[in-house]
Amino acid sequence: MVRDMNSVRVALMQINTIVGDLKENSEKIIFCIEKAKAKDADIVVFPELAVTGYPPEDLVLKPHFVKENIGYLNKIARSVKDIVAVVGFISRSEKGIYNSAGILANKKVNYVYNKIHLPNYGVFDEKRYFRPGELQRAVLKTRDFSFVVNICEDIWVSESDREKQVLSQVQFLINISASPYCMGKIDERRKLLSEKAKKNGIAIVYCNLIGGQDELIFDGRSAVFVKSGRFIAKAEAFKEDLMIAELPLNPRKKSKPKRNVKVIDIDYGSKWKKKSLRSSEFVKDMSKVEEVYSALVLGVHDYVKKNNFEKVAFGLSGGIDSALVASIAVDALGKTNVLALSMPSRYSSKGTQDDAEKISKNLGMRFIKVPIDDIFNAYLDTLKTHFLGMSRDITEENIQARIRGNILMAFSNKFGYLVLNTGNKSETSVGYCTLYGDMAGGFAVIKDVPKGLVYELVDYVNNKEKREIVPASIIRRPPSAELSPGQKDQDTLPGYGLLDRIVDLYIEKKKSLTDIIKMTGDEAIVRKVLRMIDANEYKRRQGPPGIKITPMAFGKDRRMPITNRFGEARHERDNA
Amino acid sequence: MVRDMNSVRVALMQINTIVGDLKENSEKIIFCIEKAKAKDADIVVFPELAVTGYPPEDLVLKPHFVKENIGYLNKIARSVKDIVAVVGFISRSEKGIYNSAGILANKKVNYVYNKIHLPNYGVFDEKRYFRPGELQRAVLKTRDFSFVVNICEDIWVSESDREKQVLSQVQFLINISASPYCMGKIDERRKLLSEKAKKNGIAIVYCNLIGGQDELIFDGRSAVFVKSGRFIAKAEAFKEDLMIAELPLNPRKKSKPKRNVKVIDIDYGSKWKKKSLRSSEFVKDMSKVEEVYSALVLGVHDYVKKNNFEKVAFGLSGGIDSALVASIAVDALGKTNVLALSMPSRYSSKGTQDDAEKISKNLGMRFIKVPIDDIFNAYLDTLKTHFLGMSRDITEENIQARIRGNILMAFSNKFGYLVLNTGNKSETSVGYCTLYGDMAGGFAVIKDVPKGLVYELVDYVNNKEKREIVPASIIRRPPSAELSPGQKDQDTLPGYGLLDRIVDLYIEKKKSLTDIIKMTGDEAIVRKVLRMIDANEYKRRQGPPGIKITPMAFGKDRRMPITNRFGEARHERDNA
């Protein structure tokens, strides 16, 4: 089959970049440009800031970092021939620095587009670093097609009249993005892009980053939409993907040159050749739970590998949280790279200990038992005279959790394991966790996963493997920290259904005490939970980074003062 | 003496607000307005965001927080009579929310000025929260004087022609600020204000916040400058202060009404009375070291008290860092609220143990000895089989440090102490410290103090008290973590003089590896130090908050990715 002359072949390079690794990122980009040429693509597109990785944060403030990234962009440009490449990088003018897209062709940088709308909310701080670009007024023209380029946030903002005018003169729009994942985001994005295409009667080529960077997961799902709003190709989620799409074009409009619209001729570097057509690949959608699980696996994999670790260790209690983390770790790194430590005390039940062993067998990971009672006794002896006459309380519970933290870190120091933290969002919210104890670890895998979703994910794991990875006894057992005799989470906390709802209303929906009482009906519980959330900001501040999967994660998303006497926060602190 | 009719009496209320405590802040403001009236002031001025405290961070994103703050501003307005009050608060319009100054008189809000220049660099995130105000075009007129108001950053930016025109029509400018302290800032600020006054031929009334808020210290030093650039009154540093200044005025210029300049008549609410004159108070300047020490004392006091703690505990090793923290804590909270814990091991020398006791006696604080060897032995026994055949290394050192962290937290849990961390900036930079061990604690007092400055501060402490608080033996002993036999810091690190210089060049001056090698001359050491700094971002991320005293502190000032392969950072991680 011979290609329609009224089409353009675009290659969307949905690559996983590494922040700061200018050399490796550039080599990957050059390699992908060659690959795109081998597939007879006319244009090859990379994600936002592909040269530097995203987000580079305060690296951007180092002048030599910006300089080196420009050097690499020029090196990439020199490798471009017989194709047009759109590559994200940081550009610089005498006015400041910009989040930019270089349009490269015929061994040169033909044009630089500067991002106009800089997000400075949620996890984003782009106004800290970049100057906004000026009005979009350039139409890019090469061979017999014309297009414009913009960057991430630019496409989320309503077009000005000027932008509409520019769009009306071109056949398609290329958007390069680094859009972080959270639940619901993939659908929301698809809807937005589809509407944008339809409203402007223009095709959209959308190339998104994939990969994990500290707390953020970029999910990919690059896509191509035609002017009816229908998408004709979509790339994988949570995986690197090279997608080729054959984009049918409207015949180019006669371009009456308009005031303020500059037409940039991109020198393609070769003559037009007829090329054979390959069909676009289609990939399947995911359920919400599969999406989240995939994000967590990718997040663990990338944090571990990009930080030059190979293997991980964590405390396996026989509870549901560490069971889920075990499964994620094995899927991310392979069973031989995962060590589960069981650290039982006098309060650990036989049931949880057996379950810990069972799940280790089911997953095939390494399993070691290190009982902590001798060490615990040594603490109690040493502190006896100082705590004379005082009754047991949370102090002795925390000592046990901190012994476990110390043992995990000892294995990390001795053998080079990265320690994974297994706390979920529900307990992190209310500070039902011990600083330097079960809060220890380099990476908090499920810190943004509410307890209810932990159960859904465990079901997903068992269904996916079509066998019982996580024993039913773990799923059925009432949650307990096992730090004192007969302890249950629900002695201290409301049921997780209600707790998760309150956390969602307070953290994500930013509702007030009064509103939440109205919506849930239990004043005493709501007051208690809100007080706990506010009073434990100091704990969360010292927790490890972890993967964001909700629209509002603890971390860069939510920057609350520790010293804070607003409303619910007053005069309560559990000091654990 | 009867007051000159050609003068205005301003009261600068340099108050310590509490973030989120709208009620207490408002009550303090109302109380101070009464005080200013009792001193016959014409205008009373409060710092930036006095109603909410500064910085309120993500509290601003709660709609009910903004609403309540407006309610309190209106309440304050109703208390204003026979005086003009300038009060910082958050205002709201249909376009967005603003960092504002309310001009209150005769029981009403007469005018609202919205901050134009929103800082979004360093520790500041104001573009995350606020919409910028529009061009300054209002001249405020009351009785026989006219003035303008602006907010903090507004005065640091060069005036536009429009602003110069407005300034030329008024007699003085009121700036309300929340300007955080760092070394050198007080002088820099005074110089800027003086030049601004002189250049525009206008008097400046500058009211700055005082107090500690998490990592930031606001130093006060409110001041009044006359049009020659000379200051005629300055308030205390690091203390609340009510300052009255009698400001001589130029006869008011005939105001030809200019295009775009709106004149707002402030209804003063009473007839002009002649008032008796009180002279402005003058307070003394401070040396650099005294400034830093005062900032640290204020920071500890405010963090502890504003978070509803009374007393603090920390590990007193007999080294110089914990000696300095001891002195700061006693000055901030009183000796009866300070507990020093000596936690010797087999590696602790008699010299350091004796010195720990000596300094506790000198300061009169509580002192408890809790030897850790029994607990350490229990860890070694428990881990013996797992570490079989492996030699002692950093693992066993970290276990000791983490035992101490656990004991400190046990005292915190049992008795309600806030644990102070005693790490300095030099060791924090290179990660020469143990996560969850000596890095444990709620507040890191000297985390931004380089080792060289620690010595200067200890000299200052001894000189100030005119006796040996910190024994000379502590000052003379080579620094050691005492975690293995005969260990010295300089076995692992370069001398602190060189280390501090490299840290300054890399962190504060943002110099590249190549530049720093050129400037210091030792390639191997520079490479090693930069690698350590980069590789330990993950540790600092989990450290406690602490007081910023340099232009570039670890914390909100410097937002580096943990996953980062730029340049020096590659492939090294000590994993402690």
Image (cartoon, coloured by chain):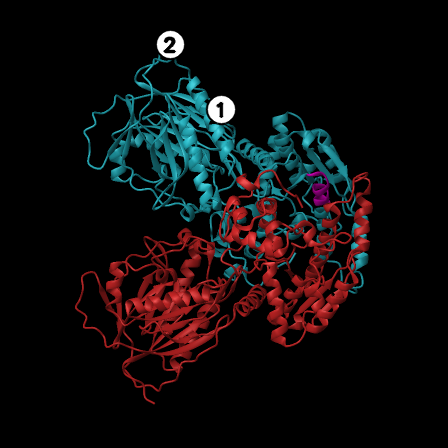
Chain colours: A cyan, B red
For residue A152, above or below residue A230: below
Looking at the image, which residue sits at the far top? A1
Residue in the image at 39% along x and 82% along y: B39
Q: Amino acid at mark 2?
A: Met
Q: Nearer the viewer, residue B540 or A59?
A: A59
**Residue B341 on image: x %, y %:** 72, 63
Asked whether, in this view, residue B85 is left or right of residue B460, the answer is left
Residue A259 placement (x, y as % from top left): 19, 36
**Where residue A487 sits in the image (x, y, percent)?**
72, 49
Chain of the residue that carries numbered disc 2 in the rendered image:
A
Write down the quadrant of residue A66 in the picture: top left
Q: Residue at x 54, y 46 (%)?
A: B517
Give the magenta range: A407-416
**Height in image: B93 above or below B186?**
above
Q: Which mark is residue A1?
A: 2
In the depicted structure, whether residue B260 falls above or below residue A55: below
**Label 2 vs 1, first from the N-terminus:** 2
Question: Which chain letter matches label 1?
Answer: A
Whole-angstrom CA distance, mark 2 to mark 1, is 26 Å
Question: Which amino acid type is marked by label 1?
Answer: Lys
* Labels 2 and 1 share a subunit: yes
The quadrant in which the N terminus of chain B is found is bottom left
Mark seen at residue A225:
none
Q: Is the residue marked by circle 2 packed among few (<14), some (14-19), or many (20+) residues within 10 Å? A: few
Disc 1 designates what residue?
A: A284
> Which structural element holds mark 2?
loop
